[in-house]
Structures are given as structure tokens and as C-alpha cells.
Image (spheres, helix red, strand yellow):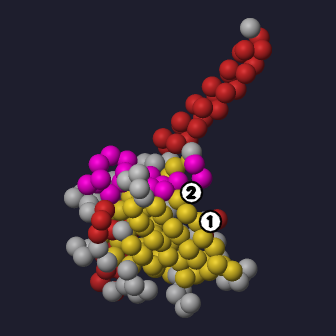
Amino acid sequence: MKTYQKILLPVAAGVLGLLILNSCSVGIPENAVAVQNFNADKYLGKWYEIARFDYKFEKDMDNVTATYSLNENGNIKVQNRGYNYVKKEWKESVGEARFVNSPNEARLKVSFFKPIWAGYNVIDIDENYQYALVVGHNLKYIWILSRTTEIPESIKLRFLEKAQKLGYNTDDLIWVKHNQ
């Protein structure tokens, strides 16, 4: 019986820990609202990262793009690519995204290291799906995306204002270079 307990307790604690980690990281920041009547088909394709907060997975990266396509299972394939200007090499990461609720709500969870998932929430997008403001599960993650390497000043200001109202310190944004 003691051997059984020695195995069961650590396994149960590990599973519980993964469930807690999984559920905590797919949220949306307080007062943020994901885009409703979201059209995933229009969102698919290549996006250029215009701005982001710095974090370890994109450290020292320029020329960053994200390409979204439909997997055979109905989930979304996420292919991120960028150039590490310090190491002078291209990096690529492929993951998967799933809708948290309905495909009509732009709340997704994304994983590059299953079973760990993180929130991916489109909180603003123009009517033609050319520019998007995306946030993670807390105020540490934010991205401004565009279908081209530039963004109109009016859209930039709209996204910055929205982010600031939610509590993001937009002075910390890294404006991504696209020169390759």
C-alpha cells in the first residue's frame, strides 16, 4: 500500500499542477474583451509583428512573422518566424491554437510546448482584417500585428490607446524592424 501511495501522490500532484497551470494561462486580462463575430478564415495567413513586449522566446528578434493556417483537425497551425540579430540566424517555432469558447469569439489558447497552453486574445481588429491588437493572459504579453510591415498612424494610436486603458505600459513596446 505504501508503494502505491508513493507513486499515486506525486502523479496526482503533477496532474493537478498541470491542470492549474493550463487553466491559469489561457485567460484574458481584466476588462479586455475579445473580438466578437470573429472570422477565423479571414484571420488566417501571414501577419507581420509590428510591436511587442520583450520576453525570452522573442528576445533579440526582428523580421518576426506569424502565419496561421488550418490544420486537418480543425485547429489552427501557428508558425512563428524571426531573425535573431545577435546570433545572426533565423528561428522558427510551430504550434497549435484552439478556440477557448466559440470560433466566433477571438479567444484562443496556443501551445508550442504541449501540454502547456497560453492565452491568445484578439481584442481589436479592423474590418478588413489587416491590423490586429493581440494580448496574452496578463499584462506581460501584447502584440500589434499587420498584414504588411507598416501600420497607419491612426490604427497605431487606436491600439496604443486601447492597450493603455487596459493597463499596458506601451512605453515598453519594442517596435520590430523588418529589413530582411
The secondary structure type at the circle numbered 2 is strand
Q: Position of residue 64 (x, y in %)?
A: 53, 77
Q: Which residues are magenta?
A: 96-114
Q: The residue under label 2 is which amino acid type?
A: Phe
Q: Give the total number of marks visible in the rendering.
A: 2
Give the residue drawn at x 56%, y 90%: 180
Specify the amino acid type for callout 1: Phe
Left/right placement of residue 60 relative to residue 174 reads: right
Q: Residue furthest top?
A: 1
- Asked if labels 1 and 2 touch by Cβ distance under 8 angstroms, the answer is yes
Q: Is residue 111 magenta?
A: yes
Q: Nearer the viewer, mark 2 or mark 1?
A: 2
Q: Quadrant of the N terminus?
A: top right
Write down the residue under mark 2: 112
| Pick the front one: 143 or 32 | 143
Q: Is residue 60 above or below residue 141?
A: below
Q: Vertically, is 176 above or below 59?
A: below
Looking at the image, which residue is at 60% across and 70% down?
A: 92
